[in-house]
Image: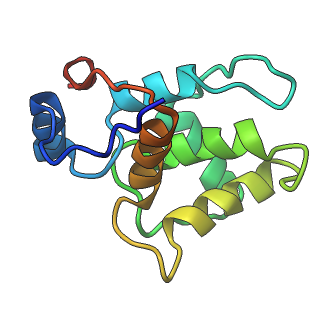
């Protein structure tokens, strides 16, 4: 399958998305990404809303310094999908994982979104950018 990042010209919808949200998750983009996730048992994830994720972070005394848009919600679900019950044991560790990803000292602005886009490109998974606005 041909990778999607071989092209120099960005799709118009992607340019518009980036002009609105930068390299961060909008609610629609996060919903679409989580909708495509499965848990370690092969079952689809049910997306927790932003307020629930923020409440869980507060419950476990985890304060994020670099959270914009729906980035924490995406990273929370990615950790839940891929690592909960394996290298992440429980909600407190899941919250710490979100912080570790978003507040990584040698990371960069928009790291979660950029990695997600790279994964979509690598898998040849097109994003219908107009649907994410």
Q: Position of residue 49 (x, y in %)?
A: 52, 29
- Residue at image location 68% in from the left, 60% down from the top: 97
Q: Is residue 118 visible?
A: yes
- Which residue ends up furthest to the front in the rendered image? 1
Q: Quadrant of residue 34?
A: top right
Residue 123 sits above or below residue 58 on the image: above
Drawn side of residue 48 relative to residue 31, left or right = right
Q: Nearer the viewer, residue 31 or 14?
A: 14
Is residue 23 depicted above or below 34 in this figure?
Answer: below
Colouring scheme, one of rainbow, by chain, secondary structure, one colour? rainbow
115 relative to 55 in the view: left or right: left
Q: Whole-percent x and y of residue 69?
A: 34, 45
Q: Does the rendering let one see residue 54?
A: no
Residue 56 percent location from the top left of the image: 65, 46
Q: Is residue 118 above or below residue 121?
A: below
* Relative depth, front residue between 61 and 69: 69
Q: Tell me what residue is drawn at x 87 percent, y 24 percent.
A: 41
Q: Residue at x 62, y 53 (%)?
A: 57
- Furthest residue in direction bottom, as rendered: 105
State how many labels appear: 0
Instruction: Give the position of the C terminus as an image quadrant.
Output: top left
Which is nearer the eye, 59 or 131? 131
Residue 92 % position (x, y): 78, 56
């Amino acid at each position: 399958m041909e990778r999607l990042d071989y092209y120099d010209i960005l799709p118009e919808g992607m340019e518009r998305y980036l002009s609105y949200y930068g390299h961060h998750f909008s609610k629609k983009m996060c919903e679409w990404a989580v909708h495509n996730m499965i848990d370690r048992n092969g079952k689809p994830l049910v997306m927790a809303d932003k307020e629930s994720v923020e409440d869980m972070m507060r419950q476990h005394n985890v304060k994020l310094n670099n959270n914009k848009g729906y980035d924490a919600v995406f990273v929370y679900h990615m950790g839940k999908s891929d690592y909960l019950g394996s290298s992440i044991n429980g909600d407190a560790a899941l919250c710490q994982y979100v912080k570790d990803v978003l507040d990584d000292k040698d990371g960069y602005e928009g790291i979660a979104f950029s990695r997600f886009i790279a994964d979509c490109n690598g898998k040849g998974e097109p994003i219908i950018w107009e649907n994410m606005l």
